[in-house]
Image: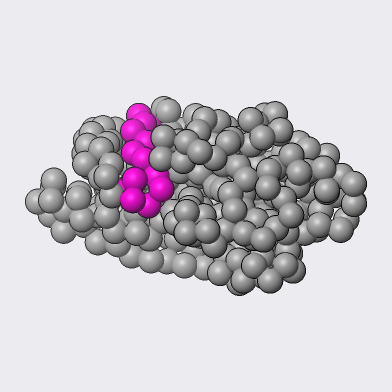
Amino acid sequence: MDVTGRLLAQTLTERLGETVLVENHPGAGSNVGNAFVARAAPDGYTLLLATPSAAINASLYRSLPYDIQKDLVPVAGVASSELVLVTAPDSPYHTLAELLAAARAHPGKLSYGSAGVGSTEHLAGELLKQLAGLDVLHVPYKGTGQAMNDLRGGQVQFIFGGAAGLVPLVRDGQLRALAVTSARRPLDLSEIPTMEEAGVPGYEITIWSGVFAPKGTPSAVIEQLNKTITAASRDLADRFAALGGRPMPMTPPQLEALLTAQIDLWRKVITQANVHVD
């Protein structure tokens, strides 16, 4: 997302003729940055580049200093991509069906790694468990890199990760891809089946990014920002493709509908998995 934000800022600077700065406000699973923008002046000069964590956190955290649906308003979609489920290259599982069969035959024996509790990668695994009826162990790490090391070492049997980081390793033979989480096979990953094609009906996760503004930002400002950001994201199609993504042009109502659907999806997954962060 940092790379996406910086590409977008550079392109917006060129289109607007004014410098657009990227300010990182890390912490608490993106809640620090989300709250910062929610409290900002509603003048169109302070914006949030949100990701699925904005929808996840609405249920993951027992209390938040902001409400993503009440304190922020949608401006424009930016980009989308998918996660990829991968195993080690010497794994005995060559297809998702084989992995699922092994998990069902040996409940509680297989495990998967993630970048941490409440991460999209973690909850992607929880969704798989729920839809496929699996009993597999989640092993949280401090980052995808550590999870990948243990995957190669055989300590965990699979992980979910962003296409941008994993697909080059798949094509180099360092990992084996079993499925992508999108509803359809992306053109640049057409050789990898979707989760549904591979045996998990109803499974779909999109990794998205969208711009939000503080509540009260004038509608005329929102409209102008939407036009400019949409044009900028289309300008970046080739750059997004290199990162395993594609432009995601959306009107404010479309982005609002996406956010609502994502909040509903993750609330169900988090509630059933009983995952919470204080």
Image quadrant in which you'd find residue 174? bottom right
Residue at 77 percent across and 59 percent down: it is 111
The N terminus, quarter of image: bottom left
Residue situated in front as seen by the camera: 162 or 72: 162
- Tell me if residue 32 comes above or below residue 135 in the rendering: below
- Tell me if residue 141 comes above or below residue 49 in the rendering: below
Number of numbered callouts drawn: 0
Residue situated in front as seen by the camera: 225 or 151: 151
Image quadrant in which you'd find residue 230? top left
Residue at 62 percent across and 59 percent down: it is 89
Please give left or right for residue 7 compared with residue 110 in the image.
left
The C terminus, quarter of image: bottom right
What scheme was used to colour the molecule? Answer: one colour
Residue furthest to the left in view is 17
- Tell me if residue 53 comes above or below residue 269 in the rendering: below
Please give left or right for residue 37 compared with residue 44 in the image.
right
Q: Position of residue 244 (x, y in %)?
A: 41, 48
Q: Is residue 150 magenta?
A: no
Residue at 68 percent across and 47 percent down: it is 94
Q: Which residues are magenta?
A: 240-252
